[in-house]
Image: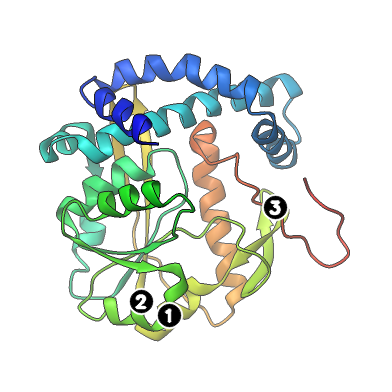
Amino acid sequence: MRFAFFILWLLHFLPLSAINAIARPVGWLAYHLVAPRRRVGRRNLEACFPDWTPAARDRLLRDHFHAMARFMLEYGIVWYSPDARFRELVSYKNLHYLTDLKDENVIILYPHFVGFEMCVYRLNQDVPLVSIYARQKNEVLDRRIYQGRQRFSNAKIISRTEGLRPLLKAMKDHTPLLYLPDQDMGAKEAVFVPFFGVPAATITAMSRIARLTRARIVPVIPRRVSPDRYELEVFPPWDDFPCGDETEDAARMNAFIEARVREQPEQYFWLHKRFKTRPDGDKPFY
């Protein structure tokens, strides 16, 4: 693991375009060698894009492996680059939708796209954040990721196991909560609502937290817009959320994420088992 960190440290000296070039053969190898994840990605794409030809879905999956390889290799930049480099690599679009709410509680809806680490580090330079952290099994990796999340001394890190109370306390001074909602966390505290037409177990915590804190929901989407540039787009705050029906809230969230995925499908996290949890009586998805 330490050797891997050394390689990432070396890579951070390269321009993004060079890392992009290196990621292409790495992604090609991963596509061919990491068969379990290839099968997961293929199954997800079959379900979400049933009208596409198998060849089109396979091209998308290969592009996604390239994007994921680049995502992993860019951790060198995320962890080791000078602070000023983030300002060169990531631009904002409509940041005012977020900064105008500095005196209100805010939940940042932030789905899993491959630019999410690079862009959130840029955001954290200018905006304090509450971040929920899931511990890693490898202690060395866990320590490195945790240290990275605090590199700007502008984030409050709350463990996923700590529960709701520390989270609400961390938000009391109007520090925005960074909320990543689009992974299968099991059936507990989840509802089944469509995602690309497939019933997906979707956690409803955003509705509860918004209700308890009277927080505004501000969607933020990271995009890789060129081989050497990212853009972080902030969308207008949602009205009428929560609406009083957690299932309707979850469906609204999934519909928004789906629309953004269709704009940049190769950049979404297709290798996650998003549909692992099934409604009672359904056969296994994977």
Asked whether residue 214 appears in the rendered view, the answer is no
Asked whether residue 60 appears in the rendered view, the answer is yes
Residue 218, how many percent across, how many down? 35, 62
- Horizontal side of 156 relative to 212 (left or right) equals left
Q: CA distance from mark 3 to mark 1?
A: 25 Å
Residue type at the position of mark 2: Leu
Disc 3 vs disc 1: which is toward the camera?
1
Q: Is residue 198 above or below residue 88?
A: below
| Residue at the spot 79% in from the left edge and 65% down from the top edge | 279
Judging by the rendered image, the residue that carries numbered circle 1 is 164
Earlier-in-chain disc, 2 versus 3: 2
Judging by the rendered image, the residue that carries numbered circle 3 is 275
Tell which of 50 and 206 is nearer to you: 206
| Residue at the spot 31% in from the left edge and 15% down from the top edge | 18
Residue type at the position of mark 1: Leu
Secondary structure of residue under mark 2: helix
- Horizontal side of 265 relative to 72 (left or right) equals right
Label 1, residues with CA under 10 Å away: few <14, some 14-19, many ≥20: few
Residue type at the position of mark 3: Phe
Residue 61, how many percent across, how many down? 61, 27
Disc 2 vs disc 3: which is toward the camera?
2
Judging by the rendered image, the residue that carries numbered circle 2 is 167
Residue 223, how many percent across, how many down? 37, 37
Secondary structure of residue under mark 3: loop
